[in-house]
Image (spheres, grey):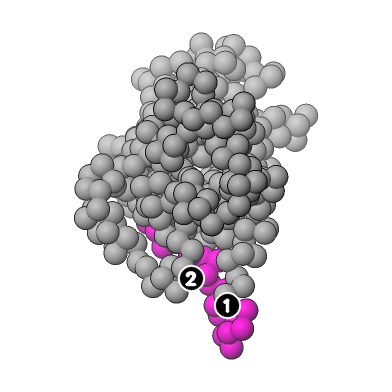
Amino acid sequence: MVGCSRGSLPTWMTAAAARVDLSGGVTPSHQGSPSPPHSSSGPAPAAGADQQLGLFERALSAAGAAFVSAIIVNPLDVAKTRLQAQAAGVLYHQPAQMAALGPDACFQILSEFRCSPSCTRGLLLGSEPVCPPDCFQYKGTLDVFLKVVRQEGFSRLWRGTNAGLALAVPTVGIYLPCYDIFRNGIEDFTRSNAPGLTPYAPLVAGSVARSLACIACSPIELARTRMQAYKEFRPGLKPPGMWKTLVGVLPPLAGSSQNVQNYRVLWTGVGAQLARDVPFSAICWSTLEPIRRQLLGLLGEDGNAASVLGANFAAGFVAGSLAAGATCPLDVAKTRRQIEKDTEKAMRMTTRQTLTEIWRSGGLKGLFTGVGPRVARAGPSVGIVVSFYEVVKYAIHQRHTS
């Protein structure tokens, strides 16, 4: 945002603000003005600077935004996945295995189950207090944070970050640029041919762009979910990384005569992921665009770099939180399908069957397991991605114009 004057909104943001409102027709970025305002430096109209950026520039902007967001919000993603996996029956202790082990191995395993010295139920094993199995039940987001740090170490809150980065960069690198291009194209087409449909451009563009990104990156999402859901019980061994996790999905299929076809197991849960992400995108963008336009319209000619950045973050935060809450049941279904280790069962499962099973076993509470960390993650994540994306687009545009 460096280099934008206080006297007017920058070209790239004027273009974003001068979109259509939900009642139809074109709304300029400043209320009461018949057309988009022009500063002394001559900002382009709505279709100007934003559309001059190519696919590579948009992808670069989005990838940078995704990189920052993935690192910041990963602990909330771990908390959400652990809560959902626990509800699906994943255990975070191994009492059945301890009886079959010798005293030394049992001591090593129990030593990994360190408990807080203030825990009144802990048993003293050597010099370390250890907890009974039910102390490893997660009771909420903060409880996940405390127990993961105490039992596995602080760095485990960033478990799956490498997969998250490997997922976020190509996903958002496909998603945001395609959204921009589809939205601009749909708006231009509908203004000339069907003005009443123009307000739905963000909804359609967001849904199509997200579908493309989900299908392309579903195997990485599968790896990340499994990495975050399971913990390593064997002392001294490092949990498997992204590639090892993905390879671990494939061995049961190695002897199949339809080996290539059966690689579709890497796309386990893609249906649930699409069922989650397409409505998420539709809700998010159809909410974000009017909020952002209203906020930027309120700024008027007094908008500076910080206020424009804040408007983008606030709009993204609100839209992301609403969309995350509304689509939480589908996120629970996606997690449950992707953590299923029985390959044949995983291939037979459908999103509808999974939702029905969750409803029967846990009711409404089961469908919204992990909604707290999911909403807490999505709000700032969308806000960071949208605001950072616009900033990098602006920086690239300024570099081109200079």
**Residue 251 in the image: above or below residue 284:** below
- Identify which residue is drawn at 65% across, 65% down: 247
- Identify which residue is drawn at 29% across, 64% down: 353
Q: Residues within 10 Å of mark 2 (few under 14, many from 20)?
A: some
Q: Magenta stretch: residue 280 in it? A: no
| Residue 183 location (% of width, % of height) | 47, 47
| N-term mark: 1 or 2 | 1
- Identify which residue is drawn at 52% across, 70% down: 265
Compared across the picture, whether 324 is left or right of 388 comes to: left
Q: Write down the residue under mark 1.
A: 253
Q: Could you tell me the amino acid type at mark 1?
A: Leu
Magenta-highlighted residues: 254-275
- Identify which residue is drawn at 53% across, 72% down: 264
| Residue 89 location (% of width, % of height) | 38, 52
Q: Residues within 10 Å of mark 1 (few under 14, many from 20)?
A: some
Could you say whether the residue bearing mark 2 is in a helix, strand or loop?
helix
Compared across the picture, whether 3 is left or right of 21 comes to: right
Give whichever of 342, 158 is nearer the camera.
342
Give whichever of 93, 70 is nearer the camera.
93
- Kindly indicate whether the residue at mark 2 contacts the one at mark 1 (C-beta within 8 angstroms): yes
- For the C terminus, the image quarter is top right
Could you say whether the residue bearing mark 1 is in a helix, strand or loop?
helix
Q: Write down the residue under mark 2.
A: 343
